[in-house]
Amino acid sequence: MVRAKAMKVTAGSLDVHPTEKALVVHYEVEASILGEGGGHMLGERKEGQKIIRVKSLSPSTDVGALAKKVVEECKLIPSSRLPQVEQLLYYLQNRKSSPVEGKSHLQMCLCSFLSLGSALILQLARNPDNLEELLHNEAALGALARVLREDWKQSVELATIIIYIFFCFSSFSQFHGVVSHYKIGALCMSVVEHELKRHDVWREELRKKTKSAPENGSLRRDQDKALRKYQGLLAKQEQLLRVSLYLLLNLAEDTRTELKMRNKNIVGLLVKVLERDDEELLVLVVSFLKKLSIFLENKNDMAEVDTVEQLARLVPCDHEDLLNLTLRLLLNLSFDSGLRAKMVEVGLLPKLTALLGDENNRQVAMRILYHISIDDRFKGMFVYTDCIPQLMQMLYEHSEEDVEAEIISICINLAANKRNAQLMCEGNGLKMLMKRALKMKDCLLMKMIRNISQHDGPTKPLFIDYVGDLAAEIRAEEEEVWVLECLGTLANLTIPDLDWELVLKEYNLVPYLKDRLKPGSAEDDLILEVVIMIGTVSMDDACAAMLAKSGIIPALIELLNAQQEDDEFVCQIVYVFYQMVFHQATRDVIIKDTQAPAYLIDLMHDKNAEIRKVCDNTLDIIAEYDDEWGRKIQSEKFRFHNNQWLDMVESRQADEAEPYLYDNDNDRTDLFYSADGITPADGSVSPDFFSDLQPQNGDMHHTG
């Protein structure tokens, strides 16, 4: 029976000969014996290599033409590999011989042999089923580790293959022990560090060759040759970096191993690799940095190098995975205020704003923008981007139930800036916000409106149309958190022409306000807003009188006693007194029917500067209209200033270790001498003497 024979030749890898000016083409021959019906019966595969010698290659050879000739004459090399052939010929053309040529040839032959053997082991290691068997072959693994440790600088290809073998082991946690046993992780750190330094040398050499513009064709050819050589070396190096970093990333699953990497500056090395353009390598590096960034120490290391600057150039980019990973890394870093500042500094704010229209990356970009919007330094910079119009458009487009929390959160932060608030109110912005907030009783949306309402200028008068709607929500039946925002918005409306008396009467707000002043009647935040609201409406004369008659002032004093440790409460209650003493009706009630002036005198020397300021201003008005309280106030101010002076003198005496500052050791009457002689030397002055002095901001000034 006659059987047909079939042969198939498949081209493999292409490389340079280690010792000669020649190319080595690897190929595989598959021989098959076919049966009667043409079916496959028996087959055999055999690997081989063909050496293409190019002895005529010299520095003046046209490499491009020679590469075309090689491809045309060697049927094993497809035409698609022409650029690779040309690159290898450039390498051969510029390869320098070692001074000890015999030794160099031997090393290169050995590297070539080891590469071939390692490649066969790699084929086995790439199948996870073989790893257990390879693990038991300690001699082979030990030899590979030793070769890598001693000869990785001699051959990039050999180092890549051996590290790839151990990378296959590192992909499974149960084999991490063998990788650590041979210290492959430390070797990979050394490889990465060395290759990055070598890359700097290559880049500097290329820069020197391309620094000046070429004047003739020969210089141009030299520059092109140098560029091609650099690109060839770069491609091989990036493959080595990729497999080394993948192995390190796998080992970093163990935090102790990750700490060792940090001690060897893994963050600095990774950030250095971010300068590359290979997108697959960048995906790996950004993934690694993202994993590291969850630890404070690593984040601090990233803050010390140009991490944000390097990441900024990747936003935006066409590689979807790379862009998404970069944004997630930036999100992790944006929890640090210093790194947020760096993001704004390098111009990421408009780039992130542009990504709000990208469905795949919008949420991450929005979260970074939220973190940036927290800082008051950067709120105003949003005005110069398209962020606020886009956010308002999103609020328009989203249904009333599914507004994303990130959108409204950014809006709340940005509304605290006056110019941002004006942009939000442009057109029918405020009308839309009010309509939606009141309809849905949306507390977050009302919080945004409340922030808008705090700014003086063109936005505040826009709220006049909604005073009634807001006042109608101030009811005991409503949830406190909702009432808090509505009440806070009303309290911000310090509009001169607004008839607060009419508002309070029409919506019966006085009983509600009075009831909420009782300590424990509601949450402190709501009670504080009630106090602020009373201070706002007390600017109106008739409204202040109505509140005074309702008994709100004693309620405020009771609240002051209960909240005397809370500076914000104290300051706001004192401000209410300040507003009320402006009006005749409420001034008389405060001065004659309450002990508010006595409380103000006690607070006159409070540690809080704002409280002291409001107290002084309020007491100045009271002293002007009531002589009796005026004398008490001035007596207290005199006593306080006198004590301060005495304390200062005693302190100075103690510091200088002098027993007596004055000749008269038992009499401090000399302290009361003055240049104009208004104070008698016998010390017989009484505090009433100062009743004709006008207090201003706590200082005594003679009125005459």
Image (cartoon, helix red, strand yellow):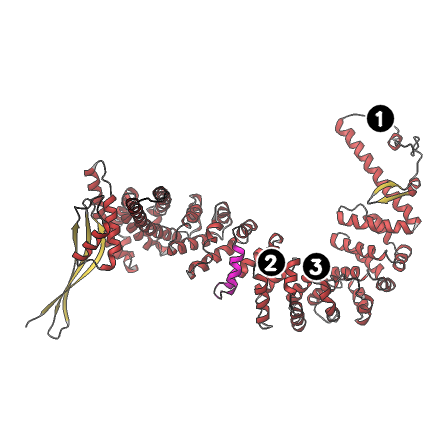
- Work out whether mark 3 precedes mark 1 in sequence or the reverse, and give the earlier one: 3
Q: Position of residue 378 (x, y in %)?
A: 60, 53
Density class for disc 3 (Cα within 10 Å; few <14, some 14-19, many ≥20) is many
Which label lies toward us, 2 or 1? 2
Q: Which residue is mark 3?
A: 455
The majority secondary structure of the magenta stretch comes to: helix
**Residue 515: where, in percent of width, then height?**
79, 65
Residue highlighted by disc 1: 662
Q: Tag 2: residue type?
A: Val
* Identity of the residue drawn at 50% across and 45% down: 304
Marks 2 and 1 sit apart, C-alpha to C-alpha, by 65 Å
Identity of the residue drawn at 65% across and 58% down: 419
User: Which numbered circle lies on residue 383?
Assistant: 2
The residue under the point 68% across, 71% down is: 438
Instruction: Judge left or right: residue 670 versus residue 185.
Output: right
User: Residue 132, image x and y in percent?
Assistant: 29, 56
Image coords of residue 209 (percent x, y)? 34, 42
Q: Of tags 3 and 1, which is closer to the observer?
A: 3
**Quarter of the image containing the C terminus?**
top right
Going by the picture, which residue comes out furthest to the front? 215
Viewer-proximal residue among 579 and 660: 579
